[in-house]
């Protein structure tokens, strides 16, 4: 029997493709778009919470480091992960129990293209940005990945385990 003695990671990361109604000019504007008058709690992770102003400032800093995204960048953000509409691998399982990962990947790329094309039409002139947060970024990153911070904005969430 082999026993792993080193660090074992069960990390989780999510990508968020988020459509903002306009290009935000400040963290206060981001906060208003994301939360309005509500606050967000990470009570499912710890007893404390993060101020929406801190979350909005983090998102605004990420926005300042990128341009609004186009179709190609959005596709790159979701292909390879688990998103709403991903095709399950068991649909590509042979009688021997092996998955044809190549066929699965191609099918999911087609599904991702369809979803992105539909969203791009729905989102119209929105400014679309991509964010990545995960458990490897500590408690704050975990809250950003799991806390539903983009729930009030149109978005696509892609999970990577």
Image (cartoon, grey):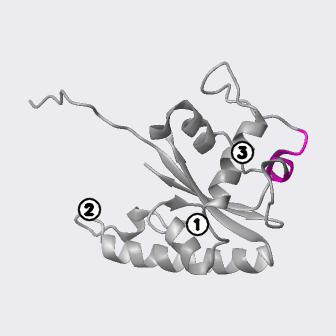
What number is the disc on residue 57? 3
Give the secondary structure at mark 2: loop
Of mark 1 and mark 2, the one earlier in the sequence is: 1
Instruction: Nearest to the eye among marks 1 and 3: give it.
Output: 3
Quarter-wise, where is residue 15 in the image? bottom right
Query: Which residue is located at x 63 percent, y 78 percent?
Result: 70
Q: Please say if the residues under marks 1 and 2 sit with CB atoms less than 8 Å apart.
A: no
Tell me how far mark 2 sits from mark 3, CA to CA.
48 Å
Q: Residues within 10 Å of mark 1 (few under 14, many from 20)?
A: few
Give the secondary structure at mark 3: helix
Whether 106 is drawn above or below 6: the answer is below
Farthest-out residue, top: 47
Disc 1 designates what residue? 85
Q: Position of residue 44 (x, y in %)?
A: 64, 27
Q: Is residue 118 magenta?
A: no
Whether 3 is drawn above or below 66: the answer is above
Q: Position of residue 43 (x, y in %)?
A: 68, 25
Q: Residues within 10 Å of mark 2 (few under 14, many from 20)?
A: few
The residues colored magenta run 29-37
Disc 2 designates what residue? 97
Q: Please say if the residues under marks 1 and 3 sit with CB atoms less than 8 Å apart.
A: no
Of mark 1 and mark 3, the one earlier in the sequence is: 3
Tell me how far mark 1 sits from mark 3, CA to CA.
31 Å
Q: Nearer the viewer, residue 86 or 25?
A: 25
Farthest-out residue, left: 1
Q: Main secondary structure of the magenta part?
A: helix
Query: Which residue is located at x 39 percent, y 73 percent?
Result: 105
Q: Is residue 34 magenta?
A: yes
Of mark 2 and mark 3, the one earlier in the sequence is: 3
Q: Position of residue 99 (x, y in %)?
A: 30, 66
Instruction: Nearest to the eye among marks 1 and 2: give it.
Output: 1
Tell me how far mark 1 sits from mark 2, CA to CA.
23 Å
């Amino acid at each position: 029997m082999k026993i792993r003695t080193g660090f074992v990671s069960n990390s989780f990361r999510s990508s968020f493709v988020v459509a903002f109604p306009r290009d935000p000019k400040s963290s206060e504007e981001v906060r208003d778009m994301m939360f309005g008058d509500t606050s967000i709690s990470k009570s499912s992770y710890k007893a404390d919470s993060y101020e929406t102003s801190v979350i909005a400032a983090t998102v605004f800093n990420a926005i300042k480091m990128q341009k609004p995204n186009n179709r190609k960048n959005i596709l790159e953000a979701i292909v390879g992960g688990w998103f709403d509409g991903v095709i399950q691998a068991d649909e590509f399982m042979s009688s021997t129990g092996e998955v044809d990962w190549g066929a699965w990947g191609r099918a999911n790329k087609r599904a991702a293209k369809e979803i992105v094309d539909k969203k791009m039409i729905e989102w119209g002139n929105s400014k679309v940005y991509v964010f990545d947060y995960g458990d490897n970024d500590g408690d704050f990153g975990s809250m950003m990945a799991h806390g539903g911070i983009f729930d009030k904005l149109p978005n696509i969430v892609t999970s990577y385990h």
